[in-house]
Amino acid sequence: MENLCDQPTFTGYTVDGGFAEFALVRADFAIRLPDGLDATHAAPLLCAGVIGFRSLRVAGVQAGERVGLFGFGSSATLMIPVLQSWNCEVYVVTRGAKHRETACSLGATWVGREDDRPDVALDRAITFAPVGKVIVDALSCLRKGGVVAINAIHLDHMPQFDYDKLLWGERQIRSVANMTRQDARDFIDLAFQLKIEPRVSIFSLDQANEALLSVKGETEHGSAVIVI
């Protein structure tokens, strides 16, 4: 449960150093990268990839299940090949036309707009948007005993919903808080085995502001990566 530390520090958020060319870390907190995995493509795997993988674990995804992805950015994109390797059916709900096109191109079982609902009950759902309404939307698609995992650092207010209709029946809502070193090790090994290569848009260090704005505006195809 190391990811649940009461006094965490985050590089580039609570401490300086997010754009440092070199870093000093404890060896037991460093993740060994497989030979052949370049740093540019490892960067999204170690951020969006690991937190997405942690979300699948928190949701308790099992092989062959129906899994919904609500919201579709870099993290959800990287989870589709993982879910497919587990023979899961993937259902994507997202408001962005570009994101729906990407989900279709990656072989999602079903893709819909934000107000669309799959015509089958889902076993698990992961929400990626920091919007409380999305949690309720995901709950409405779950079978009894299903789980919604919230992949969001912050979330706006949760709207009122009907307990008897949406949560009763041992459905669960779980939060995802950071990740563990073992999550990172396991996911990097799996991603390398599956040959997952994130789509990236490369920026130089003096374009850092442009890179951040591209993330905010979702203007790039793929994860923004700053190369020093």
Image (cartoon, rainbow, N blue to C red):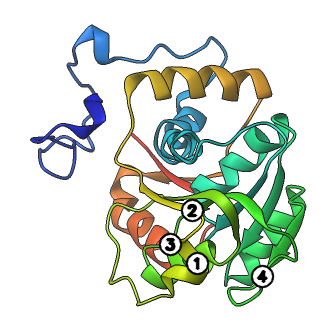
Compare residues 193 and 5 and report the one nearer the observer: 5
The disc labelled 1 sits on which kind of residue?
Leu
Residue 208, how many percent across, how many down? Answer: 36, 59
Kind of element beneath mark 3 = loop
N-term-proximal mark, 2 vs 1: 1
Kind of element beneath mark 4 = loop
Please say if 87 is above or below 28.
below
* Residue at image point 90% right, 61% down: 109
Please say if 168 is above or below 86.
below
N-term-proximal mark, 4 vs 2: 4
* Residue at image point 15% right, 41% down: 9
Q: Name the residue under label 3.
A: 129
Compare residues 106 and 63 and report the one nearer the observer: 63
Kind of element beneath mark 1 = helix
Q: Do the residues labelled 2 and 1 touch (CB within 8 Å)?
A: yes
N-term-proximal mark, 4 vs 1: 4
The disc labelled 3 sits on which kind of residue?
Ala
What is the distance, in whole Å, between disc 4 and disc 2 at their CAs?
A: 18 Å
N-term-proximal mark, 2 vs 3: 3
N-term-proximal mark, 3 vs 4: 4
Q: Name the residue under label 1.
A: 166
Q: Mark 4 points at which residue?
A: 117
Crowd class of label 4 (few under 14; some 14 to 19; many from 20; radius 10 Å): some
* Residue at image point 51% right, 74% down: 135
Please say if 220 is above or below 179.
below
Q: Are marks 4 and 1 in contact (CB under 8 Å)?
A: no
* Residue at image point 13% right, 44% down: 16
Query: Which mark is on residue 171?
Result: 2
